[in-house]
Image (spheres, rainbow, N blue to C red):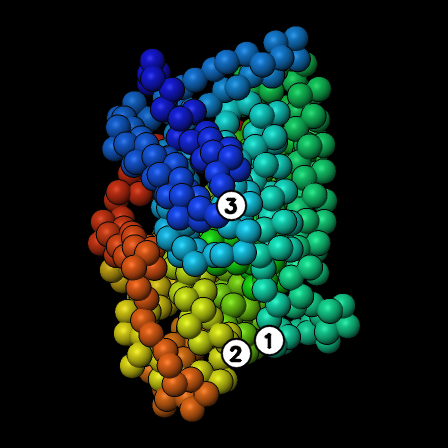
Amino acid sequence: MTLGFPVLSLMTWSPFVGALLIMFTARHRPLAVRLIAVITTGVSAVLALWLYVAYDRQAAGFQFYEKVPLVPPLGINYEVAVDGMSLLMVLLTAVIIFAGVFASWTVATRSQEFYALLLALVTGVFGVFVSLDLFVFFLFYELAVLPMYLLIGIWGSTGEVRPRGIFAWAYRETGVGTKEYAAMKLTLYLLFGSAFILVGIFALYVSAGAGSFSFLDLEGVAFDRGLQRWVFLAFYVGFGILAGIWPLHTWSPDGHASAPTAVSMLHAGVLMKLGAYGVVRVGMGLLPAGAADLAWLVGTIACINIVYGALSAMAQTDLKYVIAYSSVSHMGIVMLGAATLTEAGLNGSVFQMFAHGVMTGLFFALVGLVYEKAHSREIGKMGGFGRAMPGIATAFTIGGLSSLGLPATAGFVAELLTFMGAWRSQHPWWLLPAVAGTFLTAVYVLRVAKQIFWGPPSPHFTHLEDARGPEWVALVILVGVIVVFGFLPGLAIGPVDTATVPLLTRIIAP
């Protein structure tokens, strides 16, 4: 489907226009800055929802196609479209950033620069999910990653307690926990990954000999199988760093824990999925033979992610670190689903990107609210908050139930499909660590919920209050999405299936 109206471009660039408007807004008008952020992200959210409704599930394939030549001699074009997979990721991005603006309503320090950088980052994320030109894809990818350094380094926070886990002794020696350390570590890791991605893109461009960076052109090239293995590995490492794959995940807990609320929501909720999306869309989409040959490696590392992340989450005493390591574990489920090379597994992988994105966005919004009201993230000090914060406690409980895959939540169908895919794959033993991860998730989620919200009241906190005003908007949106997609998972699986079936057909074809 091709429209005369550039809906994808308007959705993608609306936040960037908002960023420019914010920079020209007087510093003494913080409300105007927030309203610009709400309006521009709201425009993107409405357009993303319209795309989701208007997408033709019968025609499938890439729709709402736009193309503008940029550097014709090099085959570089502004080429955008969405299919069932990217459609769900676009919707996820729109939901998280719109809710994130309300969750960060109280940001007062240099709010003008904060919202400008945040909105520029969002344009980068939208651009990655809709780009069909790999060169432009990479430019959007960098736009999505680079603002993180300033957002964490300036507006981040330093935790009260150091993380505990298998490698905690090494962390303590390097000053982990400070926002400056987290910002620099995140930036260096992701730039390292970007180098692998760039090498992979140019390897395909040169090997194809077609003078084009277009995904649609490169998709039809039969690359040498040996080349496919090496380039797929480059993409897996490059995108996998952003997805938090073990052992290249260590930037993730520090980055999440130190980031301000909206940035944590966007980072864990969307940016990590951007990494997984890159592995599936670019790695598996353009290098099917390489993906098939290395699926065993991707799946095995994913199993380590699941168990290691869950065990590390159990060991934490800082609430943000619990959620951060939980994200590492759940990203293992995402990567495991993709590695199964089954329809159920890949559908579960993409749905898990969406479900976990909304769930972890909710978690980080709640952690931000708890910290703002209690001025602490140390789990051992808290207790009985549910009496003063019934709304926050209820939202946390719903998010926790989705995290451990309870029926009627979005996380249930996503994990179930992934488990089915693992069982039907060539490595059915993958199901064991996947299920173990679910049990471990139940342990740390229920422990945290009981300690903070439903346990005996803590004497350290006497003046607590529930969510209010704009904060309620963020919570209602995120909880609503978890429940709606929990009861109606077909809303996500329907369009996703139109993208995953053709992809799997190419991978398993002789």
Q: Residue at x 54, y 74 (%)?
A: 318
Residue highlighted by disc 3: 27
Is mark 1 in CB contact (under 8 Å) with mark 3? no
Q: Quadrant of residue 435?
A: bottom left
Residue 330 x %, y %:
48, 59
Is mark 2 in CB contact (under 8 Å) with mark 1? yes
Could you say whether the residue bearing mark 1 is in a helix, strand or loop?
Answer: loop
Q: Is residue 508 left or right of residue 45?
A: right
* Residue 160: numbered disc: 1
User: Dot 1, crowdedness within 10 Å: few (<14), some or many (≥20)?
Assistant: few
Numbered-mark total: 3
Q: Is residue 221 above or below residue 449?
A: above
Rounded to the nearest angstrom, the CA distance separating label 1 from label 3 is 31 Å
Q: What amino acid is at disc 1?
A: Glu
Q: What amino acid is at disc 2?
A: Glu
Q: Is residue 100 above or below residue 455?
A: above
User: Dot 2, crowdedness within 10 Å: few (<14), some or many (≥20)?
Assistant: some
Rounded to the nearest angstrom, the CA distance separating label 2 from label 1 is 7 Å
Residue highlighted by disc 2: 378
Rounded to the nearest angstrom, the CA distance separating label 2 from label 3 is 34 Å
